[in-house]
Amino acid sequence: MADDDAGVAGNDLLVEVADGVGRLTINRPERRNAMSWTVLTGMREQLAAWKHDPDVRVVVLTGAGDKAFCAGADLTGMAGGAGELELHESRGELARLFHDLWDLGKPTVARVRGYCLAGGFGLALSCDLVVAADDAQFGTPEIDVGLWPYMITVPLVRSMPPKKVLELMMTGRRVRADEADRLGFVTKVVPVDDLDPAVDELAASLAAKSPATMKLGRDSFYAVWDQGADEALRLLHPMLTITSGTEDAAEGIAAFVEKRPPVWKGR
């Protein structure tokens, strides 16, 4: 992936934009890329900036090094000296990050190598797609220290059978990549050496699609996730008409007829 633009949002979070793909890398390998307050707020700020940036059509989340995607939230000191109310509010920042990802309007991909635990597990499953190396390990170890993974319940329950989620939360056991693939909460498992090519290929494929259709379709997917069939169909029917009336739909049909690549306008 060639660098079009790269930067650092604080040393703990690396930011890169290249070929329509924005990449956020948690850069705390010495802490297994645990999310500090700086990382959490930095990710939220960057996602907000990319949400309306036409040069970013796909977002990839990952962790630095070869040991961990993210081992959870490292919130020590994030509200140092604050009262209980401030501490309570600060603990909701991870949930707000999940919502930012779902509300982004652009495809998101988690690139996972090594440990993907606790809040990091929730972060990965809050992405649309998850590409994991075969050395990845997922888990909710909170129970082993007398805690419960409350904040990641929603992304986990949305990604695998509820009984399996409850078993993982109750036991704290690790799930290796092959089991994750069987459970269906990862999109693809590849050998370690193939991880970056697989993520780059997927991101490039997503970036080549119509931004307008991708946003409309993705937003509709999440809007009907928890709805009943009748309610969902009532929402999806007008979305088909709206999408069919976009300039990108007209361009896509014309390009197909003329046997040429489409030139998307994003509207």
Image (cartoon, rainbow, N blue to C red):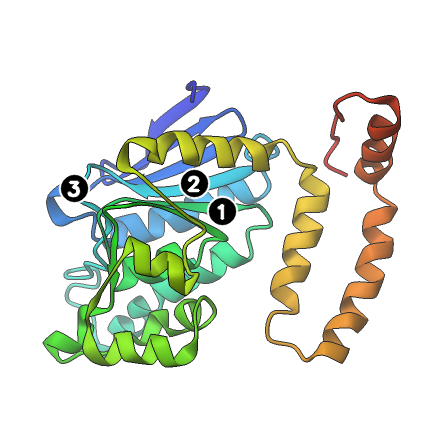
Amino acid type, callout 1: Thr
Compared with 72, 149 (above or below) is below
In the shown orientation, is residue 49 left or right of residue 133? right
Question: Of label 2 and label 3, which has the lower sequence position?
Answer: 3
Amino acid type, callout 2: Val
Q: Of 180 and 214, which appears nearest the observer? A: 180
Residue at mark 3: 29
Compared with 77, 165 (above or below) is below
- Residue name at image x 29 percent, y 57 percent: 120
Please state the horizontal and vertical placement of residue 176, each as a whole percent of the image.
25, 57
Q: Quadrant of residue 159?
A: bottom left
Residue at mark 1: 108
In the shown orientation, is residue 67 left or right of residue 162? left
Label 3 crowd bin: few (<14), some (14–19), many (20+), radius 10 Å: some
Please state the horizontal and vertical placement of residue 58, each as a whole percent of the image.
53, 39
Badge 3 vs badge 1, beta-carbon distance below 8 Å:
no
Q: Of 188 and 48, which appears nearest the observer? A: 188
Badge 1 vs badge 2, beta-carbon distance below 8 Å:
yes
Amino acid type, callout 3: Pro
- Residue name at image x 65 percent, y 77 percent: 227
Question: Of label 1 and label 2, which has the lower sequence position?
Answer: 2
Label 2 crowd bin: few (<14), some (14–19), many (20+), radius 10 Å: many
- Residue name at image x 60 percent, y 63 percent: 222
Residue at mark 2: 60
In the shown orientation, is residue 55 left or right of residue 30? right
Question: Of label 3 and label 1, which has the lower sequence position?
Answer: 3
Compared with 220, 129 (above or below) is above
